[in-house]
Amino acid sequence: MAQSRELGKVFKDSIHGHVELHPLLVKIIDTPQFQRLRNIKQLGGGYLVYPGASHNRFEHSLGVAYLAGVLAKTLQENQPELKITVRDILCVQIAGLCHDLGHGPFSHLFDQMFIDQACENEDWTHEKASLEMFRYLVHENNLKPEMKKCGLNIKDDQEDKEDDQENKKDDQEDKKDDQEDKKGEQEDKKDDQEDEEDDLVFIEELLGKPLKENKNVSKADWPYKGRKVEKSFLYEIVSNKLNGIDVDTFDYVARDCHHLGIKNNFDHLRYFKFARVVKVDKDPRKHIGSRDKEIWNLYNMFHSRNLLYREVCHHEVTNVQIMIKDALLKANIHTMFKDKDGHLLTLSAAKDDMEAYTKVTDQVTEKILQSSGEARKDSRMILERIMKRDLYKLVGEAKVRKHETILPKTIIERLKEQLKDDLTLEELEEIMNGTLEVVVRETQVKKYKLKGKVKDLKQQLKTVLPSGEQKKANDYFEAVPIQEVKDPIEYTYFYDKKNPQRGFTMPRNKVSNFLPECFWEQTIRLYWKKKEETYKDSTIEKFEKWCKDNKFEVTFNSPPNEASTSASASTSASASTSAPANTSASASTSAPASTSAPASTSASASTSAPASTSAPASTSAPANTSAPGRLDED
C-alpha cells in the first residue's frame, strides 16, 4: 500500500488563492531570518505615495515559491522524459521562497541608492546577501537534518570532513598497507561522489551565480555543479537570466498591479499551459520555451511591467525615495546594530553580518523619527518633511535623443544576403523598387554609456555652487546611471505545434512592425531639495546647457514663476560666489529593476520612465500620468 505524503501548510494568498507549501518550506518560513521580510515593503517608499502599495517581500516570496512548484510540476507532467524528480521540485521551491532574503530596508532603495553612495565602489548586491542569509538561516536553525529527512541529498560540510580526517590520521598510519590495497576502491568512490548531485549546492546556485565561476569557461560549457546540463532548464524557473521570463516576474507583476489597481493583461496560468522544455540548435543547454502563438501574452507581461515602472516606480512624486535615501545616509554612522560578537555596526556595515542584518528593516526610519539629540537631527528633519508632504520638487527632465538614417538602395543591395533570412522575397523586391523603405534607427538608449555621462553632469552641476561648498556636493545632488535593457523577446525561445521539441527565436519583423524600439527610456530628472532658491535658476540653466551639449532632449523644466523668485535674484545668485550654499539639486537616474525596483534616487538626475510597449511615451511633459491610488500631486 502506497504511503500518503506528508501534508504541508495552506496559506490564503491575495493573488493565488489557497496555496499549499511543503513542510520543509514552512520550517524555513518559521524562522526570524524569513519573518524579517514582513517588515520590508515590496515597492520601497512607494507606499508613502500610493496607499495600496503596502504589500511586503514576505507575501511575494510565498507567491514565488508556489509558482515555482506549479511550473516545475507542469513540466514534469507534460514531459516525463525530462526526469524531473521530487527533489528537483522541492529545491526550486526553496530557491523561490528564499530568493529575496537579502533585501534591505525599502527593497531596491537600499541596494541601488543607499549602498551605492554609502559604500562607493563596493561590489554588493541583494542577490549576494540572499545567498549569505540563506546559509545563515540553515545553520542557525539547524535545517540540514530536516532537509535530509525530506529526501534532499545534502553532503557533509568540508569542515566536518577535515575533522574526521584528523581523527583518523593515526589509524591511517598504522594501516598504511591496507590503505594501499584499498586505494583503487577509494578512487572509485570519489568518482561516484563527484557525480552525485548536491541539493544544497543546487539551491545556492539557483539563488545566485555558479558558486565557483571560471572565467576561462566558454558559454558552451556548463558552469554549475548542482545539476547537470541535461537539467539546465531548472535554472530558468525562479530567475531567468536569459530573458527575465520567470516566476519571480510573474508574481510581482500580478501582485503589484493588484495592490495598485493597475490592470494586468498577462495570464501566467495560460503561460504554464504552453510552457515546454525545448532544444535549441548548437546549444547543449535546454531552455523553457512557449508556443509561438503565445508571444503576445508575453508582450502583455512586459507591457504591464512597463506600466508599473512608468506610473509607480518612475513617477515624479516618488522623489520620496530620494528623501528616504538621504535620511538613511545622514543617519548611517549614528544607527547601530549588534553583530554576532556583540560589536556595534553602522547601518551600511550591518549588511556584511547576517546576525546584524536580520534586524535591519523598514523600521529603521521609525527608529530615526523617535530618536532625540543632534546626531540624527538632519535625518529626522528629512523624514518629518515626508510626513508633512514637503517633498523635493521636480524642476527639469530630459531624455536621450534618437536618430534615424535612411539607407540608400546601394547599401540595401549589399545587405541582401544578411536580410534574406529575416525578409521574404516580396519584401526584398519592395525594398529595391522603393515601395518599402528601410530605416535604421540608432537608438541612443541602448548604446549610451549613461554612467559616464551622468558623472560628467555631476561635475558640471558642482560649478554652480560656491567653491567652499563644492566638496559637499553630495548634499546638493547626485547621479546614478540606468542599466541598458534590450527587447527581452530577442532572447526568448518558442516552438510550433508541428515540432514542439525544437526551440527558435522570432524576429521582430515577423511579429509586428508596431513593437517599440526599446523597453526603457533613459530619462534624467532634476529635483530641487532646498526651500531656498538662491542657486536654483543657475542649476536649471546648467542642466539645460549640459543636455544640449550631450544630445539630450529637455522634455520639461520648471516654469519661470517656480524656477526663481525673481529675475534679479537669479542674476545676483549667479554673479556672486561668496554667498553661503543654501540650496541643493539632486541628479538621479532611476533603474528598472528585475523585480519592481523603485528607481528614482536622491539626486536630481533620475533616469526613468520606461517606454510603454503599446505606444511611445509622451515627450512633452514629465512622467506625471495619473496612476490609480496616488496619494496626492505634490
Image (cartoon, grey):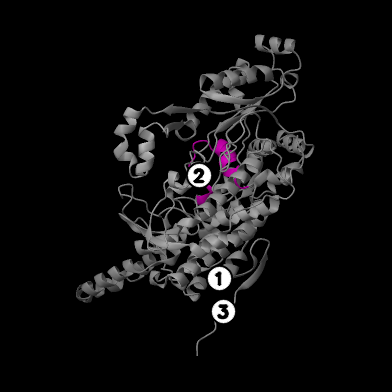
What residue is at 29 percent from the left and 72 percent from the top? 189
93, above or below 216, in the image: below
Residue 431: x and y, percent? 38, 35
Q: Which residue is mark 2?
A: 124
Along the horizontal axis of the image, is 29 left or right of 178?
right
Which label lies toward us, 3 or 2?
3
Question: Which comes before the other along the chain, label 1 or label 3?
Answer: 3
Q: Is residue 185 left or right of residue 407?
A: left
Which residue is label 1 attached to?
24
Q: How much space separates mark 2 and mark 1, taking CA atoms?
A: 29 Å
Kindly identify which numbered label has been placed on residue 261. none
* Distance in Å between CA atoms under marks 3 and 2: 39 Å
The magenta segment: 107-127
Is 125 in the magenta? yes
Q: Do we see residue 100 in this rendering?
A: no
Task: Inspect the image, locate mark 1, and give the three-letter code of the amino acid beneath it.
Answer: Leu
